[in-house]
Image: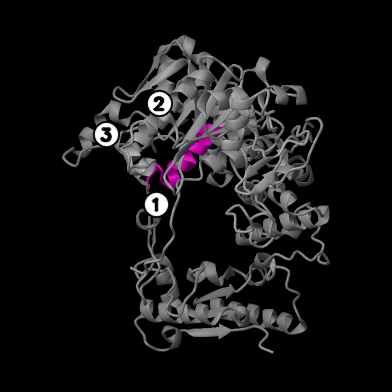
């Protein structure tokens, strides 16, 4: 088979889907309890007495990964006790932490702490009580001075050491912006990191032959540093508006060493399992950590993903020996979280007070009996699995579940004022959930909490294409900050940022068969130089010759299709493809690989529906073929020969290659 995808399931700890699930769970805590206040990183110290005292004379910490892992685990548990029981930084309401391993093997832990309301960090005075960025006086505080110099000095880098790993090769600057500037007082950031107090009192230390001052100090908490004698970075994050990126950072996955082991002449296979095996870097301490079954992450309170499915469309597990009749008649096996939610509401009047999302706070799910049972502590949180507006009824079912308490069956969700409506969409419409754009705005608001800007722009385009909002311009203004979040960090020009966002939305709309000009959105300024390679073809100015080509393509397509034959229209860019009825980009139509080589082939299997469509096509038009790479044309040629079994150019198909070849 040419081209296939093998998925690593979410049940595999550390896999892409597992890390994605953990990220969504963490963002659920943000939705319930607010943004994180403190970001803390604790790194193993190989010179801890508990490690050094147990080594043989010729050994180092790297020779005893079992000892390193056990000691770090003990220190980690002590840190959790200090944070969550003794409240050394204040009372923590919820938290997440992730264990990672450096390439040299030493483990470290990233914590994100969400404080209880009375202990929120809201001003510079609060910051100074938690975080320090100064070198203590060696006379008054000799022990603290020694610890800061040993663990909390960055670099040296920059002009002192241009080969430091933190240096950006292109800009020749430190990625962590060291050295910082001296400041007499701490300044609170507005949607930015605080500027911490670093007073210039003349204290300098010698680090590997370089004189370094407070500008090189990594942020720390004096009490925790004194207590644990290791690198203990503590930073305030409550002033940051967008927290998705810090959660993405801690759930980025494990270290990898990327290598390619692709035999020449073989098709590209997207195999997440093989990719994980080929690129995975496992250090000895991590291997020991996994062998000892120590947890790699933790979240408090726990978050449960709640199933959302249409009537009679839930997953059912059964044995291969079971008969169809027995499978259908087993009521317990057919019960899902959602149908059990209905059943609990039917049996218990008190349960009807809660919405589906709030159910895990009051009830616990028993996977054996597949029922919801009462719990006293209420330490669980619920998260409805996502649904896209393009999914239709499932999206509206999810919308109803978010707003309705106590339904006892699917039919209750169809009912509004004792009238049963035929679809969830009509029921949601009658309830006023989508009579205006409020439901769509709420959808974007919820998505902005969990999704990154690129996914949010795709969702915005999907809403425009499939849901037809009444006030597009209002929706644009309400969610512009979320749509442009990444570009605003890269560019200072307001007009350029808006152009970037609109251009990407335009590309998404074209892939759905719509034009951005049909919606009430700001116009793209063609005079602004985006300097963005991905959109160069989108903003390509068409010449007179191109307009003649388009007229010819439309006439040719209409003539062939009027005779009952299949004619396929493709182009190298989305704009050109959108000019032809049924047009698609060449990469989409032929599944052309992104990374092309001399022997590349397209990702189309001979048994697929796409292959059957290409075999039956009478004519295939490829506009702007002059812009395509030679390897792309050759890949399509090889694939067409393979799926047709004809060794003529492009499998004997009539190919119309157009474009400006001048």
The residues bearing labels 2 and 3 have C-alpha atoms spaced at a distance of 51 Å
| 575 displayed left or right of 543 | left
Q: Nearer the viewer, residue 47 or 558?
A: 47
Q: Secondary structure at mark 1?
A: loop
> CB of mark 1 within 8 Å of CB of mark 2?
no
User: In which quadrant will I find the N terminus?
Assistant: bottom left
The residue to which callout 3 is attached is 328
Specify whether 15 is left or right of 36: left
Relative image position of residue 94 (x, y in whole percent): 55, 23
The disc placed on residue 281 is: 1
Provide the residue designation for mark 2. 74
Contact check, label 2 and label 3, Cβ < 8 Å: no
| Mark 1 crowdedness (10 Å alpha carbons): few <14, some 14-19, many ≥20 | some
Dividing the picture into quadrants, the one containing residue 517 is bottom right
Q: Which residues are magenta?
A: 7-27
Cα–Cα gap, marks 1 and 3: 46 Å
Q: Is residue 24 magenta?
A: yes
- Residue 500 appears at what percent x and percent y? 73, 57
Relative to 322, say whether 299 is above or below.
Answer: above
- Percent across and percent down for residue 286 are 37, 42
Q: Residue 150 occupies which quadrant of the picture?
A: top right
Disc 3, SS: helix
Q: Earlier in the sequence, mark 1 or mark 3?
A: 1
The answer to whether residue 216 is visible is yes
N-terminal of the pair, mark 1 or mark 2, is 2
Indicate the secondary structure of the residue bearing disc 2. helix
Residue at 57% across, 20% down: 92
Q: Residue at x 43, y 17 (%)?
A: 363
Quarter holding the C terminus?
bottom right
């Amino acid at each position: 088979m040419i081209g296939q995808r093998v998925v690593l399931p979410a049940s595999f700890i550390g896999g892409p889907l597992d890390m994605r699930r953990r990220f969504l769970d963490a963002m659920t805590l943000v939705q319930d309890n607010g943004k994180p206040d403190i970001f803390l990183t604790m790194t193993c110290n190989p010179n801890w007495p508990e490690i050094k005292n147990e080594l043989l004379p010729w050994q180092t910490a790297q020779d005893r990964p079992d000892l390193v892992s056990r000691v770090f685990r003990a220190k980690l548990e002590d840190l959790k006790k200090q944070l969550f029981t003794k409240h050394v930084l204040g009372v923590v309401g919820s938290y997440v932490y992730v264990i990672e391993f450096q390439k040299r093997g030493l483990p470290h832990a990233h914590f994100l702490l969400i404080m209880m309301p009375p202990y929120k960090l809201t001003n510079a005075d609060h910051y100074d009580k938690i975080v320090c960025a100064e070198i203590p006086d060696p006379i008054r505080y000799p022990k603290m001075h020694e610890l800061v110099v040993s663990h909390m000095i960055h670099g040296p880098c920059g002009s002192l050491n241009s080969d430091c790993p933190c240096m950006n090769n292109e800009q020749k600057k430190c990625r962590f912006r060291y050295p910082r500037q001296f400041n007499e007082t701490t300044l609170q950031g507005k949607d930015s990191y605080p500027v911490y107090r670093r007073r210039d009192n003349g204290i300098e230390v010698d680090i590997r032959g370089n004189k370094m001052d407070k500008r090189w100090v990594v942020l720390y908490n004096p009490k925790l540093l004194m207590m644990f004698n290791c690198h203990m970075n503590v930073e305030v994050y409550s002033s940051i508006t967008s927290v998705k990126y810090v959660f993405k950072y801690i759930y980025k996955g494990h270290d990898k060493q990327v290598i390619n082991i692709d035999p020449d002449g073989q098709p590209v296979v997207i195999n997440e399992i093989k990719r994980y095996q080929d690129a995975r870097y496992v250090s000895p301490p991590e291997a020991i950590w996994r062998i000892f079954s120590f947890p790699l992450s933790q979240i408090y309170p726990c978050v449960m993903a709640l199933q959302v499915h249409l009537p009679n469309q839930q997953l059912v597990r059964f044995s291969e020996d079971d008969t169809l009749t027995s499978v259908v008649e087993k009521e317990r096996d057919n019960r899902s979280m959602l149908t059990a939610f209905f059943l609990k509401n039917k049996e218990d009047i008190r349960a009807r007070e809660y919405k589906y999302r709030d159910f895990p706070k009051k009830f616990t799910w028993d996977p054996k009996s597949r029922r919801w049972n009462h719990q006293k502590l209420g330490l669980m949180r619920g998260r409805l699995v996502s649904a896209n507006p393009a999914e239709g009824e499932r999206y509206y079912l999810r919308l109803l579940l978010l707003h309705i308490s106590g339904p006892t069956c699917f039919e209750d969700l169809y009912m509004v004022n004792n009238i049963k409506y035929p679809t969830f969409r009509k029921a949601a419409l009658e309830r006023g959930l989508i009579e205006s754009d409020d439901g769509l705005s709420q959808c974007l608001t919820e998505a902005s909490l969990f999704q990154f800007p690129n996914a949010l722009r795709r969702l915005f385009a999907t809403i425009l294409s499939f849901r037809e909002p009444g006030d597009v311009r209002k929706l644009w203004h309400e969610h512009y900050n979320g749509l442009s979040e990444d570009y605003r960090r890269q560019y200072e020009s307001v007009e350029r940022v808006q152009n970037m966002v609109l251009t990407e939305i335009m590309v998404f709309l074209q892939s759905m068969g719509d034009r951005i000009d049909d919606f009430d959105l700001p116009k793209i300024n063609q005079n602004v130089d985006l300097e963005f390679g991905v959109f160069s073809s989108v903003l390509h100015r068409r010449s007179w010759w191109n307009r003649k080509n388009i007229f010819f393509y439309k006439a040719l397509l209409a003539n062939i299709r009027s005779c009952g034959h299949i004619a396929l229209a493709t182009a190298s860019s989305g704009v050109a493809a959108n000019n032809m009825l049924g047009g698609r980009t060449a990469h989409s139509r032929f599944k052309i690989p992104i990374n092309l080589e001399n022997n590349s082939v397209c990702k189309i299997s001979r048994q697929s529906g796409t292959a059957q469509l290409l075999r039956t096509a009478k004519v295939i038009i490829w506009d702007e073929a002059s812009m395509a790479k030679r390897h792309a044309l050759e890949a399509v040629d090889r694939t067409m020969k393979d799926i047709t079994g004809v060794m003529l150019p492009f499998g004997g198909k009539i190919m119309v290659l157009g474009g400006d070849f001048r």
